[in-house]
Image: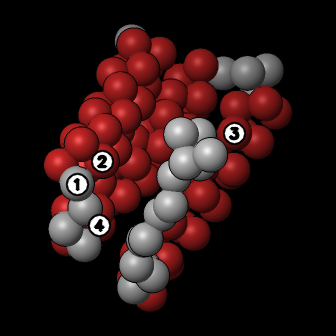
Amino acid sequence: MELFIEKVNRKKSSKPILFTRFFILLAMVIFLIMAIVNDLDISILSFVFVMGGIGSTVDGIESYYHKAKRKVVLTEIGLGIVYFVISYILFF
């Protein structure tokens, strides 16, 4: 059964990290609403991907701080880079 469900022993995040995640989520929602109101404006939608990239990078840094496996840290930071590349493509 552990083939599909992996036990996660993740430590709790500190209050500044939780505040940062909440701020990023709030900014993503605001940018998404602004993009929808402006007839799905792609330049505003790219900021949603920037916020996603920042959030994923923060998760990667936090995983590194909690001494998670190298694969986990690189995956989260790599996902952040993918978000930044998508936002760059959408913006230009």
Three-letter amino acid code at the position of disc 2: Val
Residue 62: numbered disc: 4
Q: Marks 1 and 4: CB-CB under 8 Å?
A: no
Please state which of the two labelled residues, at mark 3 or mark 2, is closer to the viewer.
2
Mark 2 sits on what residue?
72
Q: Residue at x 35, y 26 (%)?
A: 82
* Lateral position of residue 9 relative to residue 35, left or right: left
- In space, the residues marked 4 and 3 are separated at their CA atoms by 26 Å
Q: CA distance from mark 3 to mark 2?
A: 28 Å
Q: Secondary structure at mark 4?
A: helix
Labels 2 and 1 touching (C-beta < 8 A): yes
Instruction: Tell me the SS state at disc 3.
Output: helix
Q: Residue at x 42, y 53 (%)?
A: 55
- Please tell me which of labels 1 and 4 falls first in the chain: 4
Q: Nearer the viewer, residue 67 or 22?
A: 67
Residue 81: x and y in percent read 29, 32
**How far across and how far down the image is residue 37, in percent?**
81, 33
Residue 91 in view in this figure: yes
Q: Earlier in the sequence, mark 3 or mark 1?
A: 3
Identify which amino acid the numbered label 4 is placed on: Glu
Q: Is residue 61 visible?
A: no
Q: Earlier in the sequence, mark 4 or mark 3?
A: 3
Dot label at residue 69? 1
Question: For the C terminus, which image quadrant?
Answer: top left
Q: Earlier in the sequence, mark 2 or mark 4?
A: 4
Which residue: 66% across, 21% down?
41
**According to the image, label 3 marks what residue?**
32
Question: Which is more toward the observer, 75 or 39?
Answer: 75
Q: Residues within 10 Å of mark 2 (few under 14, many from 20)?
A: some
| 1 vs 4, front mark | 1
Label 1: few (<14), some or many (≥20) within 10 Å?
A: few
Name the amino acid type tagged 3: Leu
